[in-house]
Amino acid sequence: MNITSVHHVPADPGTRWTKDAGIVIDVPDDSGDWKTLTPNVIAVPGGYRMYYTLVGPARDYAAAAGSVMSAFSADGEHWTMEPGVRLAPFGPLADLRVVCPDVVPLDGGGHRMYVEGQPGDGPSNIVSAHSTDGLTWEPEPGLRFGDGMRRYGSPRVLITSDAPGARDRYRLYLHSYSHPLRLGLGAGNHIISAVSADGLTFEREAGVRIAQESALESFAVYAPEVVRLGTGGYRMYYAGWTADPIRGRIFSARSLDGLAWAKDEAPNLEPGGPGRFDAEKCSEPCVIQLPDGRFRMFYEACDEHQVWRILSATAPLDRSRVTLAP
């Protein structure tokens, strides 16, 4: 395993995205009782696998169960849902819902999936599961990150060093929310980070990576998608929500070291307006490089009927930065 295995792109995908037509992953029905959420895409032999969350059937998200599902694509354009459940809720740390999967390869083979685990009682935390084939997953014991005091979730894990045993070999980006959840710019609903030598025990790093600080972030900032750039430095795409009205947008930031981030001024994606699948919210971004060198962002979207689906957007092709994906 090396740093180019996951969350790595040869060049900066940038901030200009064009929304693609149609739906990538739809809901079982449009009653509002189901939600497809939180895409995470990795390259696998023959194409790509998307891990995502299916929540429902229930309209009340706070009490709804959620499991991790998957879909396969040979080209990043056309997706076929794979049968079965990849990871179901498991107790006691995630007995209500598992959401926001992030999958990384392991040195000895197989993969680890980090997820936001929601117990039936108490704040969310980060837990994990292991798989040898990417399809059958077994929960791993223990807690990856959490303290029972704040709400932690939307994990993304970068491999920052090829040296086994390095103290900061893995960096975990995640959101840290107040508990009970408070809204407003004083709530401290930020994106933070933690490091680990083994990918199992994480120690929080000092400070805040992305602070909740602008009018368009009055609900929270969360769902960091961090990619290491082959040209140097890092790009983060993240979700920022307003509290009144509740609207979700996708923003971006740049960093040289993965710790100090400079936000880009304008959103990368905004809600599409009445009649659009993303009429109210664009959130939970995930970025991959397509075989022809373009970059595609998958994101969860909410329409005015509170139906959530997974959509996509594509960055224009810049021939000067093309390095074809495997």
Image: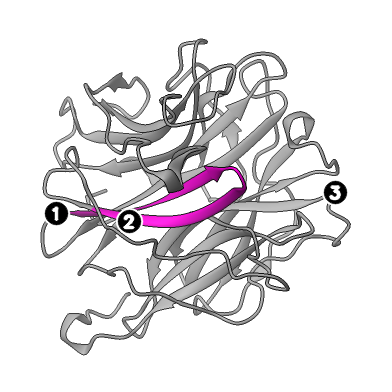
Give the structural element (helix, strand or loop) at label 2: strand
Is mark 1 in CB contact (under 8 Å) with mark 2? no
| Residue 215 horizontal/vertical position (percent) | 42, 44
Residue, x 27% and y 69% (percent of image)?
14
**Residue 106 in view in this figure:** no
Q: Say which of 303 and 205 sits in front.
A: 303
Q: Front-most of 312 and 190?
A: 190
Left or right: where 289 falls relative to 170:
right
Q: Is residue 218 above or below residue 19?
A: above
Magenta residues span: 233-253
What's the residue at 74%, 51% (across, down)?
A: 35
Q: Is residue 231 above or below residue 33?
A: below
Q: CA distance from mark 2 to mark 3?
A: 31 Å
Q: Residues within 10 Å of mark 1 (few under 14, many from 20)?
A: some
Label 1 – label 3 distance at C-alpha: 41 Å
**Secondary element at tag 3:** loop
User: Which residue is disc 3 drawn over?
Assistant: 33
Judged by depth in the image, the label closer to the viewer, 2 or 3, is 2
- Crowdedness of circle 3 by 10 Å Cα count: few (<14), some, many (20+)? some
Q: Please state which amino acid type lies under the numbered disc 3.
A: Asp
Residue found 28% across the figure and 80% down from its top: 324
Residue 122: quarter of image: top right
Specify which label sits upstream in the sequence, 2 or 3: 3
Asked which quadrant contains residue 217, the reply is top left
Query: Secondary structure of the magenta portion, mostly?
Result: strand
Q: Check if residue 244 falls in the magenta segment.
A: yes
Amino acid at pointer 1: Gly
User: Mark 1 sits on what residue?
Assistant: 233
State the residue position of label 2: 252
Q: Is residue 110 above or below residue 290?
A: above
Residue 107 horizontal/vertical position (percent): 30, 41
